[in-house]
Image: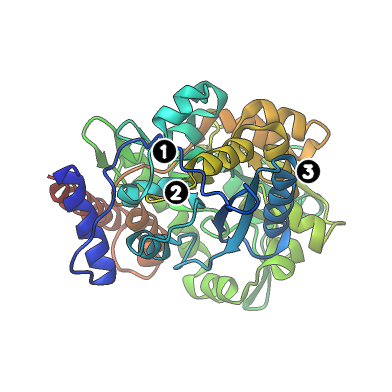
Amino acid sequence: MHTKVFKRTCIILTSLFALTACSLPANKDSASRNKGEDPKSGVAEITFWHNWSTGPSGDSITKSVEAFNKSHPNIKVKPVYVATDGGDSVTSKLLTAVAGGNPPDVMLASRYGVAEYMDAVTLLNERAEKDKITESMFYKWAWDESIYDGKLLGIPYDGTARALFYNKDHFKEAGLDPEKPPTTIAELEEAAKKLTKKEGNKFTRFGLIPWYGEGWVYSWGWAFGGSFLDGKAGKVTANDPNIVKALEWETNFAKQYGIQDVTSFTSSAGTNATNPFITGQLSMMVNGNWMISQIDQYNPKLNYGISYIPTPTGKDFNTFVGGRVLIIPKGVKNQDAAWEFIKWMCTSEEGQSLKKITGEFAAIPAINKKMYADDRRQDKFLEVLPNGKNRPVVLAGNMMWDELAKAPDLVNNGKGTAKEVLDQITKKVNDEIDKKKAQQK
């Protein structure tokens, strides 16, 4: 076993599980041909961990596994729902399973965070090269987010994107053209003022709350032209001047309308059927493509439009993209069967087309064009997906996500200026990256 990899793996597992010793296979591509077959049937049985239990996402997993099993009689995939550790992560459960010698054969994971536990993952460079699975097949952001330091940690499974949803009836009521949504920040501010309604001392409708929904610092930071990573230095740059401007702009909304009133509104707002955009209490909202299926389910008569996230110039539109990756954990005996399942799920038209159940996107442009050819509501997303921006793939990506998620509240509640808060986040994350890199030596 390579000493550096062994040391890093032990540190990760010890910190999480207080283990006194650990032993994982060397971190290199495995060409293992262990089939893991049931000796009686000759069928390779593999387990597939995911964290989608109900709704359209759960349905897509069920139908995908059923379709794969039907078309691959020599492989039987058993889907297993695993609750998250918080957010979208099942990291601690995976590391426990790997340390215990009983990992799942395949796992669905958030792409940007896999680098943090790459020592528990089987690298796929050799398998992908052999089967001609290359970067050119996928959106650039999907492939880039699946790689760390040249190591292919998994194969991109899907994609999510963000855009501006707006209520066309509210636009008409406020004297705005429902077919001309705002494209600049100035137009967005003006529309928000006209759309906001107040009765006495109480707001009954907000035109926009920038950080609500999917209006993350990432979303607006990129819209303002910011960059969250210095690739050459390997450092995060959450305090990029344009990101500072974006956060200042976001939090100025709170000052204009009153932080207590805005907080009261957002804290009482619900999700799904009680999402304030769906109920008509919020006229504009940055949200993801999955919002379309939610509107279909909870308020199909809602008259709404979808446009790009506005930018200061009304040009250079982009979108914050996310998504998942399928990985093979370390210690898996059924690697060939696991790889066949991953290939089918991530690169076949049948496997990827089942993403339509969730209203999300394939990680492959050609499949999206076919899948959503007759759904005009997806047009703006599909147009901007090639310009998608992915979160930095760094050794402290989850920390950066958590810290940036808290940034608007910190500024709104007087815990620092936008620059001060982002300076602190940048230092904290870079210190953690340096710490983890030192552990690799």
Q: Which amino acid does label 1 sit on?
A: Ser
270 sits left or right of 252 in the view: right
Q: What residue type is labelled 3?
A: Pro
Look at the image and tell me in which quarter the N terminus lies. Answer: top left
Q: Is mark 1 on a helix, strand or loop?
A: loop
Badge 1: few (under 14), some or many (20 or more) residues near its Cα, within 10 Å? Answer: few
Badge 3: few (under 14), some or many (20 or more) residues near its Cα, within 10 Å? Answer: some
Q: Which of 16 and 286 is in front in this view?
A: 16
Q: Name the residue under label 1.
A: 32
Of mark 2 and mark 3, the one earlier in the sequence is: 3
Badge 2: few (under 14), some or many (20 or more) residues near its Cα, within 10 Å? Answer: many
Q: Is residue 130 visible?
A: yes
Q: Distance between the residues labelled 1 and 2?
A: 8 Å
Look at the image and tell me in which quarter the C terminus lies. Answer: top left
Q: Name the residue under label 3.
A: 178
Q: Can residue 436 be seen in this view?
A: no
Name the residue rendered at 32%, 62% in the picture. Answer: 99
Q: Is mark 3 on a helix, strand or loop?
A: loop
Q: Which of 290 and 179 is in front in this view?
A: 290
In which image quadrant can residue 75 be found? Answer: top right
Of mark 1 and mark 2, the one earlier in the sequence is: 1
9 sits left or right of 295 in the view: left
Q: Do the residues labelled 1 and 2 touch (CB within 8 Å)?
A: yes
| Front label number (2 vs 3) | 2
Q: Where is residue 70 in the image (x, y as percent from the top left)?
A: 75, 45
| Front label number (1 vs 3) | 1
Q: What residue type is labelled 2?
A: Lys
Q: Is residue 236 above or below residue 47?
A: above
Q: Name the residue under label 2.
A: 333
Name the residue rendered at 24%, 56% in the picture. Answer: 23
